Image (cartoon, rainbow, N blue to C red):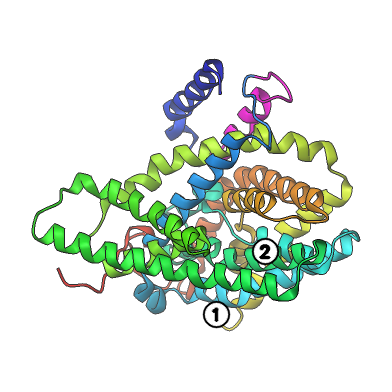
């Protein structure tokens, strides 16, 4: 990247930072603005950002962002509290996700006759994870009941890590249908990915948590060192998994989950990363998305892609959420609210880049275009509706009176809760 490009990106970050508070709750979001910035500054228009989809820098940025986001999201998940207080996201994950894959696969097969069964399933799995960052006005609006905000936060924190094995397995199956590879070969590959990856993650996360606890108790380490330790564990788990032929991204997620639920000491760095360095990486990724991916997808998009994107963001998402919450006492307006705010964003972008780099697909151009087009539409629609819908639903929920949506739970945001099993 040349100095002009670096200057343009830095000025964009400075400009966004200066008005970030003013933009909170508005119809303009960071991902939306940086996607537009990338599109305007990229090769399609001004040419300031000379990024192409095959640039190594784009893939490197995507991989680094995915590793750190997976680790930090997982480290902020308290499994014990999830079991106690969060039946809504558990239902959305365990019931809603399989239904979403099934509906998404069916929609892809109906609209795109060139896709094979496993390619359709892969497309549905790539678009499965939700991104709370695209609806930040929802999860930060105090008018929205804590229980509902936590449900969206927890779901988005967990579903990218849960979706990743499905993405890898479906990609291996789709690739096996395209290349001359025996069934045993892809089965062995998939097994190594989803077995050795978690093993590496558990090992790095558990040993890392024990060492941090001991060194913190004996005052060998300083609090400022938490940052380098967390980064070391995330990338260390990734590297270890890849060395033993597992999947490094699954390892990073499992390492964060193990580390966060083994360590009792509260690592402030993880919160600071999510709010500062993590946000910078996310914004840069959306700038690269706008510069390198969006123009290519727009040039190939048709009405069929638009139809699938709309279906993916509505029926394919909202119907499974509604079905998964039946019997909980949740009102239809709330299940509709939870269903609508399932934006597709960072994880889907990173997954499609990962798959296109790792495997060969017969219809990879279709998969790429559909994913990019759906994410772009989600960035726009969910960004525009997040603030107004959160305010409207918040006022409506307050008028509902006592109901399942307003059940008392801890007022502490779930992402700030760090239940631990180890005594220091």
The residue that appears at 44% across and 67% down in the rendered structure is 147
- Check residue 32 for magenta coloring: yes
Q: Earlier in the sequence, mark 2 or mark 1?
A: 2
Residue at (80% x, 56% y) in the render: 308
Farthest residue, direction bottom: 327
Q: Secondary structure at mark 1?
A: loop
Asked whether 153 falls inside the magenta stretch, the response is no
Magenta region = 27-47
Q: Which of the two residues, 140 or 201, is positioned nearer the viewer here?
A: 201
On residue 58, which mark appears? none
Mark 2 vs mark 1, foreground winner is 2
Q: Is residue 5 above or below residue 230?
A: above
Q: Mark 2 and mark 1: span between their CA atoms?
A: 29 Å
From the image, which quarter does the C terminus lie in?
A: bottom left
Is residue 331 visible to us here?
Answer: no
**Position of residue 420 measured from the top left corner of the image (x, y, whole percent):** 26, 70
- Left or right, 59 with reference to 410: right
Give percent across and percent down for residue 108: 82, 62
Q: Which residue is mark 2?
A: 125
In the rendered view, would you say 10 is above or below 252?
above
Q: With respect to residue 285, does 260 lie above or below? A: below
The residue under label 1 is 329
53 to 409, vertically: above or below:
above
Pick whichever, 7 or 390, lies toward us: 7
Query: How many numbered circles does the render carry?
Result: 2
């Amino acid at each position: 990247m040349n100095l002009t490009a670096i200057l343009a990106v830095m000025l964009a970050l400075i400009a966004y930072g200066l008005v970030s508070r003013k933009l909170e709750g508005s119809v303009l979001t960071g991902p939306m603005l940086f996607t537009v910035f990338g599109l305007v500054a990229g090769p399609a228009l001004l040419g300031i950002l000379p990024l192409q989809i095959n640039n190594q820098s784009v893939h490197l940025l995507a991989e680094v962002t995915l590793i750190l986001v997976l680790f930090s999201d997982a480290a902020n998940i308290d499994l014990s509290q999830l079991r106690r207080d969060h039946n809504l996201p558990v239902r959305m994950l365990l019931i809603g996700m399989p239904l979403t894959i099934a509906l998404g696969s069916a929609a892809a097969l109906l609209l795109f006759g060139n896709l094979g069964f496993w390619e359709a399933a892969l497309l549905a799995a790539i678009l499965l994870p939700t991104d709370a960052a695209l609806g930040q006005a929802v999860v930060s609006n105090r008018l929205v009941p804590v229980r509902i905000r936590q449900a969206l936060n927890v779901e988005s924190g967990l579903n990218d890590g849960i979706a990743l094995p499905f993405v890898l397995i479906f990609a291996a199956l789709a690739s096996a249908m395209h290349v001359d590879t025996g069934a045993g070969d892809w089965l062995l590959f998939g097994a190594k990915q989803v077995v050795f990856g978690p093993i590496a993650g558990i090992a790095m996360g558990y040993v890392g948590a024990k060492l941090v606890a001991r060194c913190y108790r004996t005052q060998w380490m300083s609090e400022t060192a938490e940052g380098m330790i967390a980064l070391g564990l995330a990338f260390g788990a990734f590297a270890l998994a890849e060395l033993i032929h597992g999947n490094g991204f699954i390892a990073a997620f499992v390492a964060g989950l193990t580390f966060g639920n083994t360590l009792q000491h509260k690592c402030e760095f993880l919160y600071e990363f999510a709010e500062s360095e993590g946000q910078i990486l996310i914004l840069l990724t959306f700038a690269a998305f706008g510069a390198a991916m969006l123009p290519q997808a727009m040039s190939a998009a048709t009405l069929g892609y638009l139809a699938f994107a709309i279906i993916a963001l509505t029926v394919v998402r909202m119907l499974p959420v509604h079905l998964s919450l039946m019997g909980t006492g949740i009102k239809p307006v709330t299940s509709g609210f939870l269903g609508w705010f399932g934006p597709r964003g960072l994880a889907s972008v990173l997954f499609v880049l990962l798959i296109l780099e790792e495997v060969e697909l017969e219809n990879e151009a279709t998969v790429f275009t559909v994913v990019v087009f759906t994410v772009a539409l989600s960035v726009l629609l969910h960004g525009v509706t997040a603030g107004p819908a959160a305010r409207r639903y918040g006022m409506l929920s307050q008028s509902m009176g006592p109901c399942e949506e307003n059940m008392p739970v801890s007022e502490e945001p779930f992402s700030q809760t760090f239940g631990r099993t180890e005594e220091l």
